[in-house]
Amino acid sequence: MATRSLNKVMLIGNLTRDPNLRYTPNSTAVCSFSIATNSSWTPRDGGEKQERVEYHNIVAWSKLADICGQLLHKGDKVFVEGRLQTRDWKGEDGVERRTTEIVLENMLLLQSRSGGGSQPSANDNYGDDDDDVSPPKAKTSKKSTKKQVDAPEEAMSAEDIADDVPF
């Protein structure tokens, strides 16, 4: 009997640097960037509020990599969804190295550094899975005989999307 497993990561954070878009020798796009997430707490003994920042390395492939390279900039707030992957390699200095990164399957730009609210999203329609995180669509009224069109993504704010983010 096969045992099922799950390798899923979902984060909301801010880009710590501009994405690095490059291409493999066979012209496949690869985009890497990192995001920072933070948490804060107050110790039970009543001490000062504490904060911790975690940094996460993200890598995107193919069309999703191209989209990340075009849309994302340092400071942007993003929702990312993907899977953890650990890679080993030998550096130029001959030392064995290891890194754990998130292979991107979904990305949603929540707020650009200019503060312009929600931007177009890139979801995993460019990947292998059928799940996606996308802005909600306008509801149609049963009373109206005219068909309403989906609300443009640019007009939505991060608050409109907050109910769709799974945490």
Image (cartoon, grey):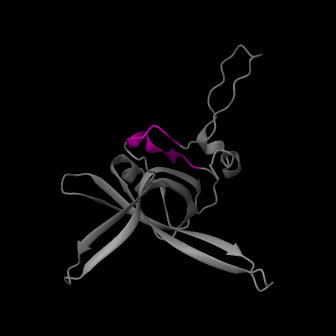
Residue farthest front in this picture: 1
Decide whether residue 59 is among the magenta residues. no
Question: Which region of the structure is painted magenta?
Answer: 119-132
Q: Nearer the viewer, residue 157 or 161?
A: 161
Decide whether residue 131 is among the magenta residues. yes
Q: Which residue is at a point 55% across and 53% down the rendered structure image?
A: 109
Measured as percent of width and height from the top left, residue 153 is found at 60, 41
Left-right relation of 137 to 15: right
How many marks can you see? 0
- Does residue 111 lie above or below 56 as drawn? above
Q: Nearer the viewer, residue 21 or 131?
A: 131
Residue farthest right in this picture: 46
State whether residue 134 appears in this view. Answer: yes
Q: Which residue is at a point 55% across and 44% down the rendered structure image?
A: 133
Q: Which residue is at a point 77% across and 16% down the rendered structure image?
A: 143
State whether residue 19 appears in this view. Answer: no
Which quadrant does the N terminus fall into?
top left
Q: Which residue is at a point 69% across and 24% down the rendered structure image?
A: 140
State the image quarter where residue 59 is shown: bottom left
Measured as percent of width and height from the top left, residue 82 is found at 45, 53
Left-right relation of 39 to 101: right
State the image quarter where residue 14 is shown: bottom right
- Does residue 139 lie above or below 83 as drawn? above
Measured as percent of width and height from the top left, residue 10 is found at 53, 56
